[in-house]
Structure formats: C-alpha cells, structure tokens
Amino acid sequence: MTTAQTIAQTTLPSADHAASLVVDVTVVGAGLVGLAAALACHQAGYSVALLDSGPGLTQSQLNADANSLCNDHSQWDARIYAISPNNAKWLAELGAWPLLDKARLGQINAMQIFADGVPMSLDAEDESADCLAYVLESRALAQALHERVSMTGMPVLFNHGCVAFDSATTTLHLADKRTIQSGLVIAADGSQSWLRQQLGITVQKKSYAQLGIVANFSVELDHAHVARQWFTSHRQDGGTILAWLPLSSNTVSIVWSVPLAYADELLALSPSAFTQAVMQAGGQALGDMRLLSPPVAFPLSRQTCERTVQDGVVLVGDAAHQIHPMAGQGVNLGFRDVIDLLASWQTKNSYQSLADSRLLNAYTRRRKADVLSMQLLTDGLFQIFASTNPVLNSIRNAAWQLANQGLVKKTLLALALKL
C-alpha cells in the first residue's frame, strides 16, 4: 500500500459513516495534469484531495517500473511528450523534475521541418535559449509526480468513482456513499470528462479521420538533439505528418499522423517492413533504424468546449481542449491551464472564494488566447497539407517559402518557447 493510499484511508472516514471530507480543492483525475495540479495547489497552501476512478500506481509498481527503466534502456514507453522549458522549470519547482532519470531524458536543441521537401530549421540558439523542449516518457513523469504526491500527505483516493455532483455545495458524491466537499473542483479527468458531462457543457469535436502511430527506434547516426518533422501531401486521401523526437542513447520516438486507410496498411506490416517505411519517409536521415517497441495507434481529433468554468468546476487538460499532436503541445497546454489558474488566485483577497467569478473570469481570459492560437496553428497546418487541390498546394508551397524567412521563423521560435 502506498503512503498516499494509507493517508487517504485514514483521512477520509469509512463508508459506514457516510462522512464528508472537506478541502479547499478537489482534483478529479490522476493523469499527468491532474497530479501536477494537485501538487501545485498543495504547494500554494491549499488543502487538496486527489480522486481517480482508476487504480493509480502502487508502490510496488512504481519500484518495478523504476528498476525496469534504469536497467533496460531498450524498453521505452510508447507515450512520449515534449515538455517546454517553461513547464520543465515549473515541474522542477513542484519537486518532480529532479526525480527523473536524466539518462533517459531527451533534449531538442533544434528542429528541421520539411514541407513537401522544402526545409526550415529552427534553432534554440537563435533565441539564446538552452533548448526548445525536453523529451521524456509519460510513465517516467507519472512516477515522479506520484512520488511527490505521496510525500505531501494529501488524501488520495484511487478506484473511487463519482456518482453525482452537487453544484450548489460543490460536493462530489462517491459510489461508496462518502462525499468530498470543496471550494473548487479541478476536472482533469480526460477527453471524456465525467464532470464535464454532469455539467452539461457542450463540446465541439472534429475528427481528422487519421490515426497517430507511435513507436520507438534505435538509430545508427547521432540525432544531435534535433527533432525532425515531415509534412507531405502526395497521397490522394490526405497528407501525412511524420515527427522524429530525440530521446537519449541514439534513440528516437516517432509520431506518424496518417489517413485511416494508410494507417491500416502500415500497422499490417511486419516489424522490418514498418521500420523500412519509417526510414524511407524520413529520407534515412539517421541511417539504419531498429524498432524497439511495437507501433501503437490512436485516433486524432480536435475538441473544444463551449466554456471551461462552471458551477465551481474548472476544466483543465484534455477535459478542456484537444489539439492535433503535430506540435507535441497537448500536455504543455494542460500544465499551462494549471499555472494560469494558480496565477489568477494570487490576487484573491481573504473574502473571495477560489470559485469567485472575477478570479475565474480572469483565468478564462488568460487561457483563451493561448489555447486558440495553438488550435489555429495545428488545425491550419493540418488543413493545408491535407489538401489535394494542386492550386492550393502551389499557394501553400509559396507561403512556406515565405515563412522560411527570418521574421516568421523568429515568431515560430518565440511561440514554442513561451509555452
């Protein structure tokens, strides 16, 4: 039993008494964004409860995964994230970043982007930055965040689903008859958010009719901490986007966004044939490649909520928004949700509640421009490279040549570094 689970059981009375836990903030969802939100609120001095309907990570699982990660560098998590420097600094302030195994931490110092063969290079040095992003495994960051949460002593309830939410009292009713009442609820419960459904918040969802295929490879040549991305529009059923993210030890993680039919073809290939397809699509930029993990696919869509604040609940992360993964910014946007929420509370006076409308309105204004700009960027790039119209493609290629000039490149660099 983990420390956090022990505390949760002793802090929250048994179901027989149908008692209520009262805290300042309840975080629903123990993914990366939810774990970070719970830590950030605790660090800011608020009492916090963390709730998830799933099992979470037990201490034995944490230890086993940590040993596996340390002892076998051929095993890599299929879920890889590129964390912006600002968010890495924030995670360090939360105490999670120092717990990561630096031997498994990748770093992006530059990017090479190819649009139908036309290259563009972005370099961190052009903005006097140390790097553009850090590349890490989801489970490694989850382990670090879980470990930090267990150190706080906050109530953590895994395998506890909610059956009702009382918006009048901001109270969550659990399946075992217990309740959690709080000043504010942070919904970090994913793209299918239960809390969002309870509030009746409308969601606009747009399917890209594509799958994202992820896999990890060892490579022959030094990746030199350069991320590579290829936009192509030669297929009749739409364009493709292939990204190679540098991990440590001459290892890369790929994300290949392709139309559904092409995804079926790729996933049906043998490991060696799939590897050859990846090498060919990337122009064999890193020489021979060896597949380290079977390819995994997930559907791609854009999701936007009509609002992200209602009845004492704030939606964050995938519960609030989803974007195309081409920029690797989904989890970064989720972390920024939490950072901006905490920033909005810094002006709170002693008479205001955490759910005060003026505070939350300031928060929504902070987030609207950030999220919208990233959604427009990723959706716009997808649309122009998905086009099969030769006239539009000619206009696109001319625009890309223009974008390859200094001012536009500096703008793209600044956008990447500000997250």
Image: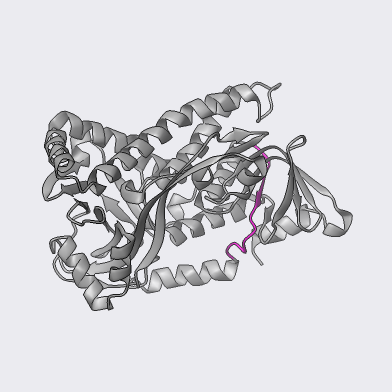
Q: Nearer the viewer, residue 204 or 22?
A: 204
- Report the span colored magenta: 46-57
State the quadrant of the C terminus.
top left
Image coordinates of residue 341 in percent, x first then y, are 54, 33
Residue at 47% in and 28% down: 366
Relative vertical location of residue 70 with respect to residue 23 in this rendering, above or below: below
Residue 104 placed where, x, y %? 35, 61
Task: Give the image quarter of residue 196.
Answer: top right
Percent position (x, y) of residue 346?
Answer: 56, 26
Q: Residue at x 84, y 50 (%)?
A: 19
Give the side of residue 158 with respect to residue 219, left or right. Answer: right
Residue with the most extreme right position: 17
Dominant secondary-structure state across the stretch colored magenta: loop
Q: Is residue 391 above or below residue 213?
A: above
- The quadrant in which residue 159 appears is bottom right
Q: Is residue 384 magenta?
A: no
